[in-house]
């Protein structure tokens, strides 16, 4: 039997008729118009990549189009059982080449990570599972948005880039052209060694799938429209990197808050032009150098331009940046352009700047009329091109108060809840860590923050997930700079490795911040978040609750004000928030003071020292909103100083002598070593190897470790190559 025949026999036992029907739907959706081109195909085998150079006609005088679609669909499905088949969703008249499509009737993105179907449905887009999946089983896939007319090369590239940014950081930035090939629905994926179906997740005929006017889609995705004509010449390259650098430096603002943000950014950039080499400003503990200031400015201008309440366009934002950023010397045009592009990509992932509470969306001017800090323009009938004031007002209400998509919420394909710190801190949630004074809660949270900023991927045996471009803002209201310096050193931070933290761990030490339960304090925090570009996916640490509030600690009104003025806004921004707090006289009852302290957090954890072993602590759940059965028990860990003088946080054995999770993790790594699994191999390969070894052992009547479950093997394989324990440093607990 040949290798190809062997792979064919491995194909999943899927209904052939259903697969052919899925492939036919794909072909009809993307090749249902006679635009004068041919379907372009390619295959990938062990021997390499091969193009179907002549293409496949679906429209020809001697062909019945419907029958041709069925015939080709059957051929694609049959071939895919043998090899990986790829197809271009855009017909090409000659060879498949960038910019050579006969027509571009869709925008597309290739998401090489967990697919957010909520965002797909928000756009009324279609989606195909590519056959690849994350370790937790969430599918990767291709996303398509249908357009009501063909678009130019530059328009298509701009829409594809922005679509990828909207879908998240896993979108492949190279798949933005009209010559891309993707996997058609109905075929199968052989890439991982196993065979997985390529199937529709959101079909073209599904409820909610829509056809977009290109300019309307551009507005939603934040693409300047119409696309500048000069982009046509470079559309087959990085089209979006070419921007009109001569854009006006004086942009009319439609909102007082918008004007204030622009004024602050441009003033900072103007001032930095006079800085000597190595100078830093007064923002933050260490201040910002020229590089950091430019990054912050580009990020904030991009996010402002993406906001639907802002009158600023991306072209205007780029013009402001180019006009006000310093020039000459080390500050070259190329360096400035690279800084803008990097931060604009980050802005697409983080999302638009949020309009702070207290600024009504009705204040946003869409006429382009200038507004001062004391005079704000309101929406009028003339602002709406249709002249229909009622319709304009209705859109404003719908934009500000969108309804939840209940179908998306209960969709079986909806990704599971993401975690910042697995089973302890959900991403985007507010969590309190409560302990008696002096136990070490601040040290624990700081160690967690350092581990996250370093990209360790794990802390005390549980996964820590902070995206590569995400950051931690640590607001420390209790410790001086000297205190913080000692703790960082004790956590293993040194001149040799501080660079890896500098851009990701931002610390405000004893800032002059008013109580976050007051209007002034809430506004100050929003300004800080906007200034440093802290938003969705980032972590905010407030140490501690009693220090960031001004009202009476025993009053529920204090916590209600904190929620209404600050916490609700942080939730809207999708920030993950950790607050530390002190317990009352009875530590089992949680935080001291008002009972409302537990009401506005999604989870609350008690940090308890062990009475017999002073170096052992337990994190015990006092409140959590997770579904029943989704969480683990208490997290028991040991905090001790290693031989190198640095503090370590390890999982501790349980009192009854049963192996701790950390012990099992070590055993799992040893098992993978014994089975010869490469440390760089994927978790799928690791698990398949373990399953094969288990089957062989059972066939021989031999014992195999019962603890070798999929989740443990996945965690062990992900952690191979670096130590389980997070190296931190010595020093007293707060």
Image (cartoon, helix red, strand yellow):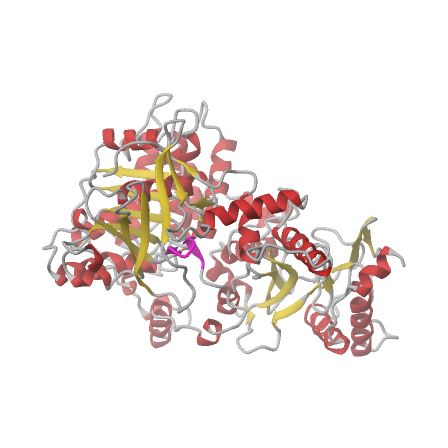
For the image, the number of numbered tags is 0
Say left or right for 600 vs 454.
left
| Residue 61 within the magenta-colored segment of the rendering | no
Could you tell me which quadrant the C terminus lies in? top left
Say left or right for 644 vs 38.
left
- The answer to whether any part of residue 276 appears in the image is yes
Residue 502 placed where, x, y %?
A: 39, 33
Tell me if residue 105 comes above or below residue 715 in the rendering.
Answer: below
Q: Nearer the viewer, residue 712 or 393?
A: 712
Say left or right for 699 vs 305.
right
Tell me if residue 70 comes above or below residue 434 in the rendering.
Answer: below
Residue 405 placed where, x, y %?
A: 44, 73
Which residue does the image show at 83% across and 57% down from the upper left?
52
Q: Nearer the viewer, residue 204 or 497?
A: 497
Which residue does the image show at 51% across and 49% down from the upper left?
664
Q: Nearer the viewer, residue 665 or 462?
A: 665
Q: Nearer the viewer, residue 58 or 348?
A: 348
Residue 517 in which image quadrant: bottom left
Which residue does the image show at 32% across and 52% down from the upper left?
619
Could you tell me which quadrant the N terminus lies in? bottom right
First to last magenta residue range: 418-427
Residue 262 in which image quadrant: top left
Residue 672 placed where, x, y %?
A: 62, 46
Which residue does the image show at 54% across and 69% down from the upper left?
413
Residue 17 placed where, x, y %?
A: 76, 78
- The answer to whether any part of residue 254 appears in the image is no
Residue 703 in which image quadrant: bottom right
């Amino acid at each position: 039997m040949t290798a190809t025949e062997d792979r064919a026999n491995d194909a999943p036992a899927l209904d052939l008729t259903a697969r052919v029907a899925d492939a036919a739907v794909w072909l009809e959706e993307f090749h249902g118009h006679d635009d004068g081109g041919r379907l372009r195909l390619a295959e990938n085998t062990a021997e390499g990549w091969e193009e179907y150079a002549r293409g496949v006609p679906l429209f020809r005088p001697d062909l019945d189009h419907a029958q041709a679609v069925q015939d080709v669909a059957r051929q694609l499905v049959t071939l895919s059982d043998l090899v990986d088949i790829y197809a271009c969703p855009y017909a090409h008249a000659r060879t498949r080449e960038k910019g050579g499509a006969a027509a571009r009737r869709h925008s597309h993105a290739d998401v090489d990570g967990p697919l957010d179907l909520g965002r797909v449905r928000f756009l009324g887009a279609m989606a195909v599972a590519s056959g690849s999946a994350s370790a937790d089983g969430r599918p990767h896939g291709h996303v398509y948005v249908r357009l009501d007319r063909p678009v130019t090369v530059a328009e298509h590239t701009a829409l594809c880039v922005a679509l990828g940014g909207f879908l998240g950081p896993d979108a492949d930035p190279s798949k933005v052209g009209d010559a891309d090939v993707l996997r058609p629905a109905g075929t199968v994926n052989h890439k991982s060694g196993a065979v997985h179906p390529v199937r529709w997740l959101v079909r073209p005929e599904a409820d909610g799938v829509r056809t977009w006017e290109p300019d309307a889609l551009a507005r939603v995705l934040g693409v300047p429209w119409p696309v500048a004509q000069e982009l046509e010449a470079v559309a087959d390259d990085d089209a979006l990197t070419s921007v009109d650098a001569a854009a006006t430096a004086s942009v009319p603002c439609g909102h007082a808050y918008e004007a204030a943000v622009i004024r602050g950014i441009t003033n900072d950039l103007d001032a930095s032009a006079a800085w000597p080499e190595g100078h830093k400003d007064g923002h933050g503990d260490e201040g910002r150098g020229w590089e950091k200031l430019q990054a912050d400015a580009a990020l904030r201008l991009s996010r402002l331009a993406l906001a639907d309440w802002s009158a600023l366009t991306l072209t205007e934002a780029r013009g402001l940046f180019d006009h006000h950023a310093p020039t000459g010397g080390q500050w070259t045009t190329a360096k400035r352009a690279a800084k803008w592009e990097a931060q604009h990509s980050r802005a697409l992932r983080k999302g638009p700047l949020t309009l702070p509470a207290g600024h009504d969306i009705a204040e946003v001017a869409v006429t382009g009329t200038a507004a001062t800090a004391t005079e704000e323009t309101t929406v009028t009938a003339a602002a709406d091109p249709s002249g229909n004031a009622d319709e304009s007002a209705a859109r404003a209400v719908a934009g500000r108060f969108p309804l939840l998509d209940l179908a998306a919420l209960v969709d079986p394909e909806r990704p599971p809840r993401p975690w910042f710190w697995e089973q302890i801190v959900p991403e985007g949630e507010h969590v309190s860590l409560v302990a008696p004074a002096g136990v070490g809660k601040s040290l624990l949270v700081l160690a967690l923050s350092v581990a996250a900023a370093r990209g360790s991927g794990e802390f005390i045996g549980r996964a820590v997930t902070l995206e590569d471009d995400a950051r931690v803002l640590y607001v420390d209201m209790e410790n001086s700079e000297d205190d913080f310096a000692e703790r960082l050193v004790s956590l293993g931070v040194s001149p040799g490795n501080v660079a890896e933290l500098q851009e990701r761990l931002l610390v405000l030490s004893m800032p002059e911040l008013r109580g976050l339960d007051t209007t002034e304090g809430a506004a100050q925090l929003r300004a800080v978040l906007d200034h440093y570009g802290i938003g969705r996916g980032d972590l905010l640490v407030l140490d501690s609750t009693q220090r960031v509030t001004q009202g009476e600690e025993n009053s529920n009104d204090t916590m209600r004000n904190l929620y209404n003025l600050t916490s609700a806004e942080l939730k809207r921004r999708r920030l993950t928030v950790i607050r530390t707090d002190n317990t009352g006289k009875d530590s089992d009852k949680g935080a001291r003071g008002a009972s409302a302290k537990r009401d506005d957090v999604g989870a609350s954890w008690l940090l308890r020292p062990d009475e017999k072993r002073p170096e052992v602590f337990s994190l015990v759940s006092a409140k959590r909103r997770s579904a029943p059965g989704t969480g683990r028990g208490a997290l028991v860990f040991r905090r001790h100083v290693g031989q190198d003088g640095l503090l370590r946080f390890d999982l501790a054995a349980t009192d009854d002598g049963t192996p701790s999770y950390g012990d099992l993790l070590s055993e799992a790594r040893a098992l993978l070593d014994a089975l010869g699994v490469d440390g760089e191999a994927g978790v799928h390969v690791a698990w398949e190897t373990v399953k094969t070894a288990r089957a062989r052992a059972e066939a021989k009547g031999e014992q195999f470790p019962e603890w070798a479950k999929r989740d443990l093997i996945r965690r062990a394989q992900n952690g191979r190559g670096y130590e389980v324990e997070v190296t931190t440093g010595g020093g007293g607990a707060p």
